[in-house]
Image (tube, grey):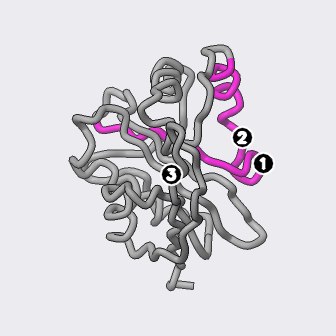
Amino acid sequence: MVTLKGSNIYLRALEPNDLEFVYELENDETIWSVSNTQTPYSRFLIRQYLENAHQDIYEAKQLRLAICKDQDFPAVGLIDLFDFDPKNNRAGVGIVIKNPDKRNAGIGTEALDLLIQYVFTQLNLNQLYANIDVENVVSISLFTNFGFQKIGVKKQWNLVNGQYKDEALFQLINNQL
């Protein structure tokens, strides 16, 4: 059985006490360009989202998990499955570590490893994909280290600070099927 617990981190479902963490992360304008966020979120909206976070992935078509480092429960980041497509057995994946000081410390690597194991063994997905700004070398390195392959570039895909940016599409096929 696959566990969502690694040697240094674990992934868990969102809880009501994650309200402030999610609020701060969703309203951090420095990461809006990687999350395609364009407007701030209210605590009210995030509270509603958390109240519905119990929905099954087949119903919600997404799954957001908190990345936790310590046993005292606080999240350090989020890892998401989005555009879940059970007919074609695929989903998009995104990851963010809130505190820049905790980035490049192996947390994202372990979280992505746990998620890949989970989706290929528990959800029986055939593939994962990630949309990454072509200039985001850290994320490109993270995903390619797990075998994600660049399959194309969407030219001038995202408008960021008045400039159009290219976005690469990376794909990981489950070769164990």
Q: Residue at x 37, y 33 (%)?
A: 98
Residue 172 versus residue 119: which sits nearer the camera? 172
The kind of residue tagged 3 is Gly
Helix, strand or loop at mark 1? helix
The answer to whether 117 is drawn above or below residue 133 in the figure is below
Q: Quadrant of residue 77?
A: top left
Whole-angstrom CA distance, mark 1 to mark 3, is: 19 Å
Dot 1 crowding, Cα within 10 Å, few <14, some 14–19, many 20+:
few
Q: Which residue is mark 2?
A: 55
Q: Which residue is mark 3?
A: 94
| The one of 124 and 32 positioned closer to us in this rendering | 32
The magenta region covers: 45-69
Left or right of 13, for residue 68: left
In reply to whether residue 75 is colored magenta, the answer given is no
Element carrying mark 3:
strand
Rounded to the nearest whole Å, what is the CA distance between mark 1 and mark 2?
A: 6 Å
Find the distance from the CA under tag 3 to the CA under tag 2: 19 Å
Q: Position of residue 148 (x, y in %)?
A: 44, 73
49 within the magenta span: yes
Q: Nearer the viewer, residue 85 or 148?
A: 148
- Front label number (1 vs 3): 3
Q: Which mark is residue 59?
A: 1
Q: Position of residue 30 (x, y in %)?
A: 42, 32
Label of residue 51 in the image: none
Viewport quadrant of the C terminus: bottom right
At 59% from the left and 22% from the top, the residue drawn is: 40
- Amino acid carrying label 1: it is Glu
Instruction: Count neighbours of disc 3 (C-alpha within 10 A) and say few if under 14, some if 14 to 19, many if 20 or more.
Output: some
